[in-house]
Amino acid sequence: MTDLNCEITDAVATVTLNRPQARNALSAALRQELRATIARLDDDDTVRAIVLTGADPAFCAGVDLRELSAPGPHPAVGPLAEPFITSRTPLIGAINGAAYTGGLELALACHLLVASERASFADTHARIGFTPGWGLTVLLTEAIGSRRAREMTLSCQPIDAQTALQWGLVNRVVPHEDLLRETAALASAIAANDAAAVRRLTGLFNDQAAARDLTSWQLEAKAFMGSELPTDRQ
């Protein structure tokens, strides 16, 4: 069993985080493999949309804190001063369960989000005594506004799928058993359009966000460098 699965069907790639026993927490190896896989798919002209999901019951619990708290050198976790994963191929998150902390940052790096009714979202950086480094403060504010982003970040309280829809964090909420089918249908609709135009438009959205948010990314990276690695309090 591998920690990351990738299947391509009719120009749509489905990438699945596959560490269900660890709530799909991002180990150093999984982080490296995920970024390499998305980059490879983005370079593949036959892939016109990418779906990212997790093996049930969670989407992603964030960075593997047990790995970080183990003796010896810590694997690098950031800061990135850019989304954790980047792509000019449309990237759709199929959020099947909990997307917490680094998992929330991973979801926010997607261009579109379809959530299962079982999905939930939380930022627990403040609980574990850590500062975000993958764009949480930038991307969450962009998605739901400053006041709601502050509420999520400072309270560490999760929100459910319907609240995420109401706040604009996700594009739609669907029954859990329909999540992959509905997300694949959206990906197929995108893939059916002119591929070059879709890549140009996605790249334009990416570039506009990067130019608009450059200072915010730099400020988050500076704050991250002043924080300490978390202990195992997941």
Image: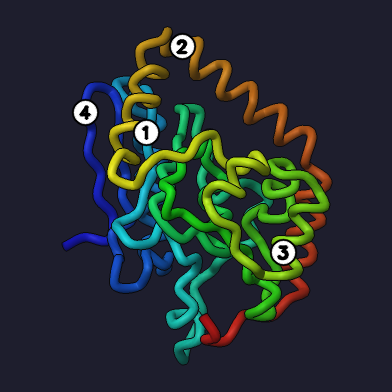
Which residue is found at the position 36% from the left and 37% from the top?
A: 40
- Mark 4 or 3, nearer chain start: 4
For the N terminus, the quadrant is: bottom left
Q: Nearer the viewer, mark 2 or mark 3?
A: 3
- Mark 4 or 1, nearer chain start: 4
Q: Which residue is mark 4?
A: 9
Q: Amino acid at mark 3?
A: Thr
Residue 119 image point, x, y percent: 46, 54
In-image side of 203 versus 215 (left or right): left
User: Spatial distance from mark 2 to mark 3, Cα to Cα?
Assistant: 38 Å
Whether 33 is drawn above or below 108: the answer is below
Q: Nearer the viewer, mark 2 or mark 1?
A: 1
Q: Which residue is mark 1?
A: 183
In-image side of 56 versus 114 (left or right): left
Whether 92 is drawn above or below 35: the answer is above
Q: Which residue is mark 2?
A: 196
- Mark 2 or 3, nearer chain start: 3
Residue 153: mark in rendering: 3
Q: Dot 4 lies on which element?
A: strand
Q: How many marks?
A: 4
Q: Amino acid at mark 1?
A: Thr
Q: Nearer the viewer, mark 2 or mark 4?
A: 4
